[in-house]
Image: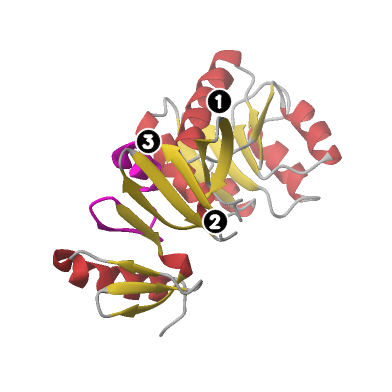
């Protein structure tokens, strides 16, 4: 994902960049962020390679943000446009260039947090990943490659789609922390988490996984597990 921040004030660019980077790190999403001090600089860079997202300050010296957006739209109809401004007076012109959002200055951390979710919901994303130490080396484990994981004797055993079991010394709480908020993951009981992407069915007191394994669920979580599985299937369009 390529992101452009276009603003003639260096301190405004730096502030927006730092907050964006923090929100993207929280979501384990990688992005290349470039800064431009004018609309002209941005348009030159955009000709070479289109951006995924562009933050355009409306009130800039030279070519303002609205004019920059109009010029960009002649060649690029896909870039997500966010105007950064102290006023929403240009809402109609923003509509004409299909702006996604107006980010009113001074913007808050909460505003960037919400906007980041909105941006990520509109673009195809590489899968998220976590970093794990396995056999003395740090690896990237993509969420989609986790079938299920279980905690035993201070070690997490991660069963993967490659039919390998990775072991890493970690608390269960620390392991599942980055997975919170991901509807595809369900904690089945003390020390066990399953990836619903790889669940073929819900049978008796267990998920039957695509690889044939069974992940058992605590008795008190059976109703929640069944509901989470149905909601996940509905969300993915597997049932109607």
Please indicate whether residue 162 sits to the left or right of residue 18 in the image.
right
Q: How many marks on residues? A: 3
* Residue at (29, 40) in percent of width and height: 173
In this rendering, is residue 223 above or below 50?
Answer: below
Please indicate whether residue 48 sits to the left or right of residue 111 in the image.
right
Q: Label 2: few (<14), some or many (≥20) within 10 Å?
A: some
| Residue 170 circle label | 3
Percent from the top left, x then y, of residue 73?
A: 74, 49
Residues tagged 1 and 2 counted as in contact (Cβ below 8 A): no
Percent from the top left, x then y, of residue 99?
A: 58, 48
Residue 181 can be seen in this image: no
Between tags 1 and 2, which lies in front? Answer: 2
Q: Label 1: few (<14), some or many (≥20) within 10 Å?
A: some
Query: Farthest residue in the left direction?
Result: 220
Q: CA distance from mark 1 to mark 2?
A: 31 Å
Residue labelled with disc 1: 17
What residue span does the magenta drawing correspond to? 170-191
* Residue at (76, 50) in percent of width and height: 76
Q: Quadrant of residue 209 in the image?
A: bottom left
Please indicate whether residue 63 sits to the left or right of residue 11 in the image.
right
Q: CA distance from mark 1 to mark 3?
A: 32 Å
């Amino acid at each position: 994902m390529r992101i452009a921040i276009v603003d003639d004030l260096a301190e405004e660019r730096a502030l927006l960049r730092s907050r964006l980077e923090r929100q993207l790190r929280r979501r384990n999403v990688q992005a290349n962020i470039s800064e431009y001090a004018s609309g002209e600089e941005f348009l030159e860079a955009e000709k070479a390679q289109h951006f995924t997202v562009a933050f355009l300050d409306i009130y800039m010296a030279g070519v303002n943000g609205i004019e920059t957006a109009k010029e960009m739209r002649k060649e690029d109809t896909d870039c997500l446009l966010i105007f950064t401004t102290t006023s929403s007076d240009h809402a109609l012109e923003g509509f004409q260039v299909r702006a996604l959002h107006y980010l009113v200055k001074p913007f808050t951390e909460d505003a960037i947090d919400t906007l980041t979710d909105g941006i990520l919901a509109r673009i195809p994303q590489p899968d998220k990943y976590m970093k794990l130490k396995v056999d003395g080396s740090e690896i990237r484990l993509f969420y989609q490659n986790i079938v299920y994981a279980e905690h035993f004797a201070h070690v997490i055993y991660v069963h993967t789609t490659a039919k390998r079991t990775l072991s890493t010394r970690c608390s269960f709480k620390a392991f599942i922390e980055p997975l919170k908020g991901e509807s595809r993951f369900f904690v089945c009981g003390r020390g066990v988490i399953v990836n619903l992407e790889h669940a073929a069915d819900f049978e008796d007191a267990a998920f039957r996984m695509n690889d044939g394994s069974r992940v058992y669920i605590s008795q008190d979580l059976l109703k929640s597990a069944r509901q989470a599985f149905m909601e996940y299937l509905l969300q993915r369009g597997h049932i109607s």
